[in-house]
Image: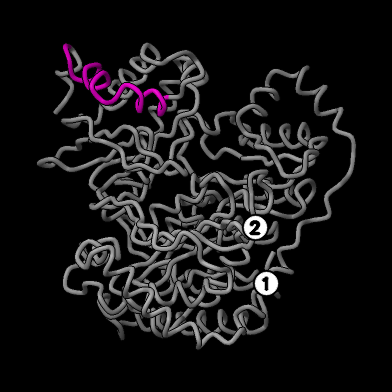
Amino acid sequence: MYDYSEFDESFVRERVAQFSQQVERRLDGSLSEDEFRPLRLMNGLYLQLHAYMLRVAIPYGTLSPAKMRQLAYIAETWDKGYGHFTTRQNIQYNWPKLTDVPAMLGALADVGMHAIQTSGNCVRNVTADHFAGAAADEIADPRPWAELLRQWSTDHPEFQFLPRKFKIAITGAEQDRAVIAAHDIGLQVVKNAAGETGFRVLVGGGLGRTPLLGLTVREFLPEPDLLPYVEAVLSVYNTLGRRDNKYKARVKITIREVGEDALRGMIEARFAELRPLFGGADQALLAEIKEAFAPPAFRNAPVDGYDAFYKADPSFRAWADTNLTAHKNAQYAIVTISLKAHGETPGDATGAQMRVMADLAERYGHGDLRVSHEQNIILPHVHKSDLPAVHAALVQAGLGTANVGLLSDIIACPGMDYCALATARSIPVAQELAIRFKELDLEHEIGPLKIKISGCINACGHHHVGHIGILGLDRAGVENYQLTLGGSGAEDAAIGDKTGPGFAYDQVVPAVERILRAYLELRDGPGETFLAAFRRVGMEPFKAALYDGEGAKDAA
């Protein structure tokens, strides 16, 4: 993976020193909260319901064991012993004291980490496919381009005060595991007819109060044009984006106000102006970056032991069936470590669990860990002969839940338990759903299912692109939950459709149960997934199950 240079080290240390002085001035009263707010947000520090929250950047979700151990140390030294992994492949600490934040940032800098641009109206953490460099369906590892974009966008003088925050995602595979259609810029590595590498470019995706999928502005952008083209998009947005209304300030709204064809034309015109200014320094830097992402030295060893263990041990077999993904090297597998034990908070990991994952990556995983946008941790390169040992260690640490891709593998935002913007709880809904369907023993019968929960209209839980989406709202001081069906964040991206009236907090789990029992009756055999069945039969049978008869009494 990429190692930070002396310049990076100096830059981060300087920012830590600056913010330390700003914290001192806030504590002694020299800065008011209004004056301090933009300064702390530039360093990833939020003020939540009960305490400050520090959001730490994990560029494109890639971590080394040393960095994961440092995250554990920070959790145990200055927080409550755990961290929360997010849908932007970052980690959040929910309980830091303001007086401790400079020390936390210093500890992050010790391992080449920081919290810069994890907040504010700037280019946020560039996210990527969490199986990058390992996936069997990959055209090219997207992380070198993600790192190029990270370096280019960090402290970029033109783009530090955009009309609104700006999010970029990139995938190098046929399957979209980075939700590129829901980003301000989505990039997919593709090959043209001549076999040349380039990008399909989407602009103007986003969720929140106005969910929209990205517009394809280029079917094929040559690789050397990436940086000037991204700069052209941002330059046009920076000029046209609304600054008078933050709810209409994202680029997705700009497209609708200006028009798709007009925006395409402006991007292309700005690109024509910028392209001659890029004389090749970006490509020379990219070449250096690519060297840092060379594949690990894969072992060549028998896998017979794995096959025998898979047949003999039902617990291991269940875990392997859900938590392993095909690797480009047939002797290896990609391991997804579920942070979704039934009844626990999705995305949370204790310091002890972080160290276990770091140790496993170091011993069995070529020193590589990833954070997925689905709030799990990935060991992208594990030899199949080592999988029984990895599984045993995970089980002992409470990390062996065999549920990846199933109902209880839920994305959930912090909701009203933590967030000052939330209008309803989301974590307890996720916990109760997981427990209920474990009691019913229906998860495996239901099969692949993505439930996503947001505690407010900002949609940090990606509910719009859930197969089942749950949005918590405030209706006259009472929590009310709106359900959507049929969304997808994959290559078949879709915004879910609302079912109808919402449900009280204590009726959400029964409502989801009615939906899924209807699915089991409607599906065309066990091979038809929930999403496929919904697309085949439409909303009406599910609405009937939800609202007809007794179900109608539960709806608000």
Residue 441: horizontal and vertical position, in percent? 49, 15
Instruction: Name the residue at 63% across, 62% down.
Output: 196
Q: In the rendered structure, which amino acid carries the disc numbered 2?
A: Asp
Specify the segment rendered in magenta.
530-549
**Percent position of residue 265, x then y:** 32, 72
Q: Is residue 201 magenta?
A: no
Q: Is residue 40 visible?
A: no
Q: Which mark is residue 289?
A: 1
Judge the density around disc 2: few (<14), some (14-19), many (≥20) Cα neighbours within 10 Å: many
Q: Quadrant of the C terminus?
A: top left
Q: Position of residue 543 (x, y in %)?
A: 22, 22
Q: Which residue is mark 2?
A: 141
Picture residue at 41% right of the left edge, 26% below the top: 532
Task: State the CA–CA distance, disc 1 to disc 2.
Answer: 12 Å
Figure quadrant of residue 12: bottom right
- Residue 239 in the image: above or below residue 533: below
